[in-house]
Image (spheres, rainbow, N blue to C red):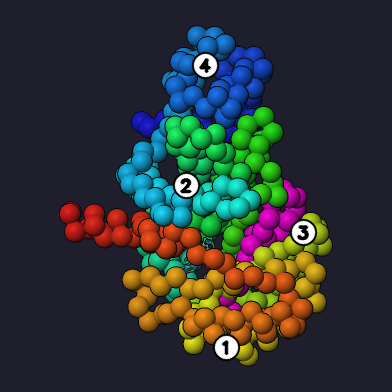
Amino acid sequence: MNKPSIYGLTMEQLAAWLMEHGHKKFRASQVWDWLYRKRVTNFSEMNNVNKECIQVLEDNFSIQTLTEHVRQESKDGTIKFLFRLQDGNLIETVLMRHKYGLSVCVTTQVGCNIGCSFCASGLLTKNRDLTSGEIVEQIMNVQLHLDDRGQEERVSHIVVMGIGEPFDNFQNTVDFLEVIKDHKGLAIGARHITVSTSGLANKIYEFADLKLQVNLAVSLHAPNNELRTSIMKINKAFPIEKLMDSIDYYLEKTNRRVTYEYILIRDVNDHKAEALQLAELIGDKRHLSYVNLIPYNPVDEHGDYQRSTPEAISEFFDTLKKKGINCGVRLEQGADIDAACGQLRSKQEKKKEKVN
Ligand code: SAH
Ligand code: SF4
């Protein structure tokens, strides 16, 4: 049987597990230090940990469960990794370089069941949730790759925006966040972490209650129910009013700014009327709102959708600005390496189908 990745345990869970297996609690911080600071990939290298403890860890856990299947590097420094999971499934992880640091975009599920009409991953349907360990390990593998390059580079920011709906894999996502935030481990600041959801309102309440200090992004993409339902069927279960109620609750609990993601698809959701409606929708919370305008990234699977024209993008942006809404246009990265959500994976899956 495959052993789970040890990266999936929070520090507390690791300490509890070790004590249950007859070891001292302090071993947990030693092991933690080896995993996240010294970043060894074999238990046997943990040379201040006694043999019995190493043995029990080796018997029950793996450190690495992912293998690199493909790696593509863009001219702008973006690196896209395609990892193979122990069960053979492929997932993708992207490293992006910004002025403010290095950010990694992680995947939370194999495929996605939300089925948004514009998304390459939506068509694949969910095969399974990733474990917390598999989500952490994506970051560890990117960090180990950077370590190998010897430039002393560190992953400083995380975006949970790869394939999958993190709030449809809620507990594993929360455990993952606890692990990467831990001060004795990777110590990635909560304010440097953003979780993006397609708008599972019920989970937004739960997330607010956890007070993790992590940033929340909501994929809105349309300012009214008719349009939103036509491109995101999740809007039937959680229509805009319900979604906005959950966001009000989140704002009240956390007082933290929410980002609204809005992809601009030509002639679908990019008219001035929609910009005005969007401004109306979030107007009363504009002080705690930011709209991220994302020029649509065309994917083979949806040939009928195109990116908005530069004029339409500018007009949309200007309209929001005039209404006092904080907003920006996301710059594209890695355009030459299929860096859009799900694209590399879906290409590889197609190749696989051809081979099989
Ligand atoms: N499931 C979550 C997180 C993963 S998707 C969510 O939907 O929020 C991350 C972001 O990429 C979402 O805002 C999603 O709408 C957007 N996205 C999906 N396909 C895209 C495409 N082809 N071009 C641009 N953005 C896309
Ligand atoms: Fe799933 Fe997000 Fe893609 Fe929608 S946009 S199908 S929720 S990954």
The residue mark sitting in front, 1 or 3, is 1
Q: Secondary structure at mark 1?
A: loop
Q: Which residues are magenta?
A: 201-226
Amino acid at pointer 4: Met
Q: Are the two marked residues, 3 and 2, in contact with CB atoms closer than 8 angstroms?
A: no
The single residue placed furthest to the left in the displayed view is 355
Nearer-N-terminus badge (3/2):
2
- The answer to which quarter of the image holds residue 202 is bottom right
User: Which residue is drawn at the image coordinates 67% and 29% (left, top)?
Assistant: 184
Give the Cα distance between marks 1 and 2: 38 Å
Nearer-N-terminus badge (1/2):
2
The residue mark sitting in front, 1 or 2, is 1
Amino acid at pointer 3: Arg
Q: Secondary structure at mark 2?
A: loop
Give the left or right position of residue 315, taking residue 74 as reference: right
Instruction: Name the foreground residue: 268 vs 26.
Output: 268
- Residue corresponding to mark 4: 46
Disc 2 packing (10 Å; few <14; some 14–19; many ≥20): some
Residue 109, image x and y in percent?
Answer: 46, 53
Give the left or right position of residue 94, taking residue 25 as reference: left
11 over 127 or under it: above or below = above
